[in-house]
Image: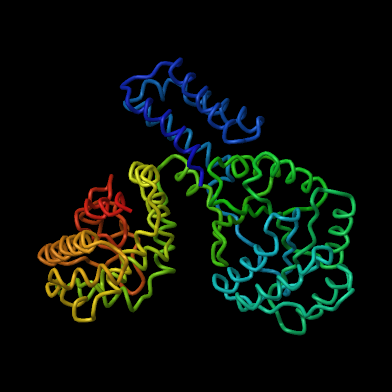
Amino acid sequence: MFDSLSDRLGGVFDKLRGRGALSEQDVRNAMREVRIALLEADVALPVVRRFVDTVTEKAIGSEVLKSVTPGQQVVKIVSDELVEMLGGEETEGLVLEAKPPVVIMMVGLQGSGKTTTTAKLAKFIKEKHGRKSLMASLDVNRPAAQEQLAVLGEQVEVATLPIIEGQQPVDIARRAMESAKLQAADVLLLDTAGRLHVDEALMAEMKTVAGVSAPTEVLLVVDSLTGQDAVNVAKSFTEEVPLTGVVLTRMDGDARGGAALSMRHVTGKPIKFAGTGEKLDALEAFHPKRVADRILGMGDVVSLVEKAAQTIKEEDAEALAKRMAKGKFDLNDLRMQLNQMNQMGGLGMLAGMLPGMKKAKAAMAQSGVDDKVLVHMDAIIGSMTPKERENPALLNAKRKRRVAGGSGTAVQDVNRLLKMHKEMSRAMKQIKKMGGLKGLGALFGGGGMPGLGGAGGPPAGGAGQLPGLGAGAGVDPDTLPPDLRDMLKKK
């Protein structure tokens, strides 16, 4: 997300950082480029104007221009203003501390991803807050909308209100309230009907439903890919419905970021969640500071650690840490780490969340690399016998040909994988000599991993390493390991 905007701003700030002294004109020229970058990212004009004026006023102050590192100071000001534009330092979550059932009403246009987001949010509430939810579809206009929510409910294991043919939205809302009370549900999620455009009938229906259900949260779901149009839709809803927050969908495909950057200013309401993929767990709480850091290419290590903690099984991490402590690291261990990388979003996502990895991510995109390389590597290991995985030294030329044939790859790929494993295994032994890992969490620069205690300081290879590629094995933070890079290029 925000790739094109991040690249443009990165170029502007690289010029500022590279200069020892800055004049007022230098700052104004840079801000002119920032203005163009924001407008090209489809950020609303009033938001751009206010942002650039505020940054310029602060950046041309004598304490900035006469400081030792004026370029860095300007970047810091931009970062602070970006956070403010996105909603401030504090993350505003759901208000669930009310008399149950707490009603969350989902509103928005048809096609914005409202029904899927309702199911994602129910899953999020169940897993993050431990609350019992009930979902109800009030959409009687779109064919099979109610059935869709019922299917999604089964997938996320959250109850849905039984469908009664011909019942109207207001009556469904009343029945949902009664059912939620009878089932002792903590939260009731109402998926309201959308239209292809904002109209009086849509607004009147929503107001009536809100009057019956008295929602604690009214969340507007908008598709971030529609850019400026998403902002116009948000403005229309804000004028008619008492919104409490916004959910931006398809943020993973939004390279520009205009909707996210404009939404808070236009609606006056916080962005509470961001949809980051099609899977039902691809919903993230919106953290303005973390998003600002991603836009400015500073990475998002906190989110990466959280994602790792959710994905990596505690017992697997403990078992691997014990083996590493003994200097052991076979192909089964490598396979486990590659699978963890895949579950955490793949190479591109990880590179985007790590500071200092922008160049590596750009090189991957330029060479047409995708996460199929992880699948290929897994296939190679999967084509080996259990004994070969435990003892790679058994793999002679004949066995390598068999493994390559079984995995649909070339012998050279098998050799690259074995060489990468050998380098990682050697690094594990070096770490053992240095006193061990002090918890695998050190891999993430002090975040700590479940079941492994806190980290004992930064990793040996720096904070820019990819998880699963050496656990402090001295990997260059500005690039990928050579053998993995060769394999990526080949694929």
Residue 481 lies, with reference to residue 19, above or below; the image says below
Colour mode of the rendering: rainbow
Q: Which of 370 and 72 is in front in this view?
A: 370
Q: Can residue 3 be seen?
A: yes
Q: Which image quadrant for residue 191?
A: bottom right
Residue at (65% x, 30% y) in the render: 45
- The residue at the far bottom in this view is 182
- The residue at the far left in this view is 433
The location of residue 23, given as percent across then percent down, is: 41, 16
The location of residue 406, given as percent across then percent down, is: 29, 72
373 to the left or right of 416: right
187 to the left or right of 468: right
Q: Which image quadrant for residue 114?
A: bottom right
Q: Which image quadrant for residue 319?
A: bottom left
Residue 76 lies, with reference to residue 128, above or below; the image says above
Residue at (38% x, 25% y) in the render: 16
Residue at (62% x, 51% y) in the render: 271
Q: Can residue 453 be seen?
A: no
The location of residue 94, given as percent across then percent down, is: 63, 62
Q: Nearer the viewer, residue 130 or 307?
A: 307
444 to the left or right of 224: left
Number of labels in the image equals: 0
The location of residue 283, given as percent across then percent down, is: 56, 61
Residue 225 lies, with reference to residue 221, above or below; the image says above
